[in-house]
Image: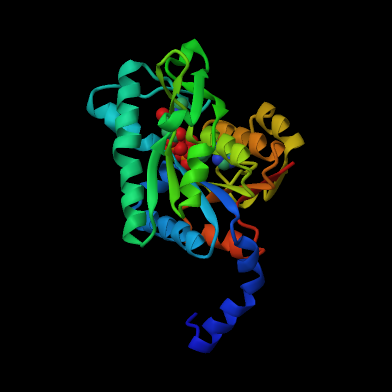
């Protein structure tokens, strides 16, 4: 559908009240591994985030990169192993993880954002001790969980009109570097910074009753229903940290969390600008 210039202008005027409401709203966006592998889609997602910035919102980006870490492990002859969606991380895997996440993916996102005219700042949890981590379970090796988030550095970057782009690694009190699931980091950052929304971009339509049947999408989940979905094994694998982080965020004051499909161009903007039911929404 091609809009005339008049229609385009009318559409923008119609959105004026919403655009006014967006001013200074902080939205944490977790951009996930599998939804990142397609270059064209990557560009769409990053442009959408830049647009959010230009209309006055404060996007904070937490990125993943699981598939790329797995590929790099394969190259050095290591097999990736996951327990409940978390990568078992020995010392060598931790080094690979940091190189791939902070050394490569983070820098690519920041440089893409700069190409579209917005300033973005590359950080990980270690920067100014933003995230204090602790070991999750000795069986998982250097897998961390978020103990505390200090939002000073994020607030400074936002006040300077820039977009923080965060890699999910952080230091523990023991001085070790820990690999933290990016969904968990996004949920905890959203809660700590008092974000209005948390958006998790992934490569499935949302949470489904049967993950092989897209028509079984669950459009709205209340926090009190989450435990049962996990116990009944409707939610499994990589969806577990995702739904848990949504739980953490909305029980700590984030109004809404959304799990949406990054393979569908513009799904994030549809969610923000319209009342369309896109993906799965989680509320308290
Ligand atoms: N009920 C469910 N609905 C949708 N996906 C599910 C469900 N249960 C488990 N999953 C799995 O969770 C995966 C999403 O997690 P993950 O691959 O870690 O995403 P990302 O790489 O974007 O962080 C899906 O690809 C799917 O295999
Ligand atoms: C502990 C743990 O599993 N960490 C993740 C960190 C990256 C991530 O979360 O990437 P996605 O969002 O693409 O899955 C990992 O090593 O894959």
x, y percent for residue 109: 36, 49
Residue appearing at x 42%, y 43% in the figure: 34
- Residue in the foreground of this view, choosing between 33 and 210: 33
Counting every numbered tag in the picture gives 0
Position of residue 121 in the picture relative to residue 217 (left or right): left
Can residue 192 be seen here?
yes
Whether residue 153 is situated above or below residue 56 in the rendered picture: above
Q: Residue at x 33, y 42 (%)?
A: 105
Quarter of the image for the C terminus: give it: top right
- Identify the residue at image location x=31%, y=47%: 108
> What x and y, as percent, mark residue 116?
35, 62
Residue 203 in view, yes or no: no
The quarter of the displayed image where residue 66 is located:
top left
Q: Which residue lies most toward the left here?
A: 76
* Residue 100 locus on image (x, y percent): 31, 34
Residue drawn at point x = 50 percent, y = 29 percent: 131
Residue 22 in the image: x percent, y percent?
61, 61
């Amino acid at each position: 559908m091609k809009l005339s210039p008049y229609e385009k202008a009318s559409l923008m005027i119609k959105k004026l009240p919403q655009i006014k409401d967006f001013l200074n709203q902080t939205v944490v966006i977790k951009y996930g591994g599998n939804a990142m592998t397609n270059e064209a889609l990557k560009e769409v997602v990053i442009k959408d985030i830049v647009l959010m910035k230009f209309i006055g919102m404060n996007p904070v980006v937490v990125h993943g990169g699981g598939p790329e870490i797995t590929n790099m492990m394969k190259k050095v002859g290591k097999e990736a192993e996951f327990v409940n969606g978390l990568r078992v991380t020995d010392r060598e895997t931790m080094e690979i993880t940091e190189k791939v996440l902070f050394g490569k993916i983070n820098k690519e996102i920041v440089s893409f954002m700069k190409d579209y005219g917005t300033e973005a700042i590359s950080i990980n949890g270690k920067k100014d001790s933003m995230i204090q981590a602790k070991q999750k379970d000795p069986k998982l090796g250097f897998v961390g969980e978020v103990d505390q988030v200090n939002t000073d550095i994020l607030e400074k970057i936002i006040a300077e009109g820039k977009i923080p782009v965060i890699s999910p690694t952080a230091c523990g009190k023991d001085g070790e570097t820990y690999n933290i699931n990016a969904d968990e980091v996004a949920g905890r950052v959203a809660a700590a910074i008092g974000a209005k929304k948390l958006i998790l971009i992934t490569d499935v339509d949302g949470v489904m009753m049967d993950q092989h049947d897209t028509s079984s999408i669950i459009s709205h989940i209340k926090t009190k229903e989450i435990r049962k979905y996990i116990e009944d094994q409707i939610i499994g694998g990589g969806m577990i940290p995702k739904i848990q982080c949504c739980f953490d965020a909305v029980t700590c004051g984030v109004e809404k969390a959304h799990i949406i499909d990054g393979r569908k161009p513009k799904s994030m903007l549809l969610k923000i600008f319209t009342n369309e039911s896109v993906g799965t929404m989680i509320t308290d």
